[in-house]
Image (spheres, helix red, strand yellow):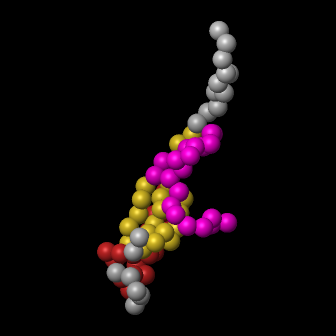
Amino acid sequence: MFGKKISRKKIFMEKVYHIYAKKECLYNNLNEEQFNNTWETLKGMVGLMKTDYELEDLSYEECNRTHGYHSENRNEPDGADSY
């Protein structure tokens, strides 16, 4: 049998979060602990401080990010690199 040898790399799934305000990504690729802390902080800031945002403007997206191979569908929000 002839053909391409298929690499058997381990693929890891990681749950990540992106936080938005009025559909603009504020934070991306947060792990669960980072998300929980940041989400609660943002909600408190919007509720206590006078800002351009209301609580209803905040939203988040939960994604599964894969590790171990290159994927064209990477669940990255639009915008510039964060590094």
Q: Tell which residue pokes out farthest to the front in this image.
A: 2
Q: Which residues are magenta?
A: 63-83
Please give the name of the residue rendered at 52% of the width and 63% of the height, measured from the top-left corner.
Answer: 78
Q: Quick one: 11 or 41, which is closer to the camera?
A: 11
Classify the position of the N terminus by image quarter: top right
Say whether residue 27 is left or right of residue 54. right
Can residue 48 be seen at all in this image of the molecule? yes
Decide: is 38 above or below 77.
below
Query: Is 79 inside the magenta-drawn segment?
Result: yes
Where residue 12 appears, as percent x and y from the top left, is 57, 40
Where residue 8 appears, as percent x and y from the top left, is 64, 27
Q: Tell which residue pokes out farthest to the left in this image.
A: 56
Q: Quick one: 35 or 2, which is closer to the camera?
A: 2
Where residue 82 appears, as percent x and y from the top left, is 62, 66
Query: Is 70 inside the magenta-drawn segment?
Result: yes
Where residue 30 appears, as percent x and y from the top left, is 53, 60
Locate residue 48: give its quadrant.
bottom left
Can residue 15 be seen at all in this image of the molecule? no
Decide: is 27 above or below 72.
below
Classify the position of the C terminus by image quarter: bottom right
Q: Main secondary structure of the magenta part?
A: loop
Please give the name of the residue rendered at 39% of the width and 74% of the height, measured from the top-left corner.
Answer: 22
Q: How many numbered marks, from 0 up?
A: 0
Please give the name of the residue rendered at 42% of the width and 59% of the height, measured from the top-left corner.
Answer: 61
Q: Tell which residue pokes out farthest to the top in this image.
A: 1
